[in-house]
Image: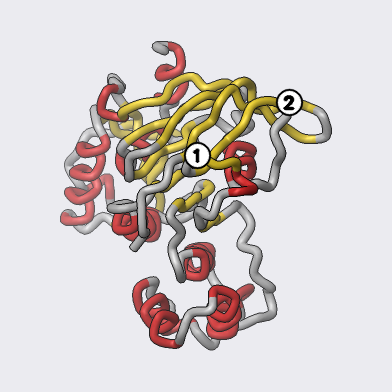
Amino acid sequence: MASEIPSIAADHFSTGYSGKEVLHDLSFNISVPGIYVVLGENGSGKTTLFRAITGLLKPFRGVISLNGFPIQESKVKISYLGHNDAIPAGMNVLRVMKFFASLENVNDHVLQIAIERFGLREMLKKQFNELSRGQKKRVSLAKSLLVPGDIIILDEPTSNLDPSVSSMVRNLIREESRDRIILYSSHNLYEAMDIGSYVLALKGGNLEYFGDLRALSVQNYKIGIRADGIEKSGLRYKTEGNFYVFDVESPQETSELISSLVAKGVRIYEVKDMSNPLESFYENK
């Protein structure tokens, strides 16, 4: 449990790479625990913002502070899960977990709790490079959250995962958000509304919106489902490529649709946002 709720404040902050500015004049203040979805299309600056908050990128102008101190002077602990697993492919899962446990200086009891919590018991003897994408993500989350930081940063943690694993990952993240600040990046507005309390939306390196997700209004979604057996479900749909496409009005309706299909014996392989509500969201800002 975090000792206190930290704060993250950006004051006219700009940064980038090799002299090229990527983030432009960002100002925001995060001081309430919860899940803050950093929302934006690919190239909008989400990963750059995360690298700046962790201190990997220095500012061109302005400052980001944690608990009122510049990042380099702050004692706030950050847990960061980036795009890359940062795990040697030749190590088995048990060795991976023991290695990161030693770095975090945690005892075997804490290690065993993480192994059980993230469902790693059956894969402990497997080499990391032998695992499925979903299994690799669970190992990466487990090693990153052995000792959860006061701030947890997750860069698109459900990308390329099947629906059941994505749901498991989001449930684990919700558990950690009760007394912490979690920054969770996504390019999917549907996912943001499913998991988040607040949103920080970037477009072209600019801050387009920062506030309560409940204040947003999205008219409808087109959800594509790749599955076997939908033809016999009796539900209305269209087809686009390999996907059966349904019109829904909310993430809750999508969850109800999936539950209904599963109850009818449909085997679901993938759920995908076929529309682009993120685009219409920006147009309405």
The quarter of the picture where the N terminus appears is bottom left
Whether residue 258 appears in this view of the structure is yes
Q: Which x, y percent locates residue 131?
A: 55, 73
Instruction: Give the structural element (helix, strand or loop) at label 2.
Output: strand
Q: CA separation, marks 1 and 2?
A: 25 Å
Q: Nearer the viewer, residue 27 or 199?
A: 27
Q: Where is mark 2, residue-wise?
A: 21
The quarter of the picture where the C terminus appears is top left
Residue ID at (41%, 35%)? 30
Q: Which x, y percent locates residue 85?
A: 61, 62
Q: Which x, y percent locates residue 200?
A: 44, 30
Q: Is residue 163 above or below residue 40?
A: below
Q: Residues within 10 Å of mark 2 (few under 14, many from 20)?
A: few
Q: Amino acid at mark 1?
A: Gly
Circle 1/circle 2 CB separation < 8 Å? no
Residue ID at (36%, 49%)? 5
Q: Nearer the viewer, residue 88 or 9?
A: 9
Whether residue 126 appears in this view of the structure is no
Q: Depth-wise, is mark 1 or mark 2 nearer the camera?
A: 1
Asked which quadrant contains residue 112, the reply is bottom left
Chosen colour scheme:
secondary structure
Q: Is residue 146 above or below residue 244?
A: below
Say which label, 1 or 2, has the lower sequence index. Answer: 2
* Disc on res. 68: 1
Q: Nearer the viewer, residue 270 or 31?
A: 31
Q: Amino acid at mark 2?
A: Glu
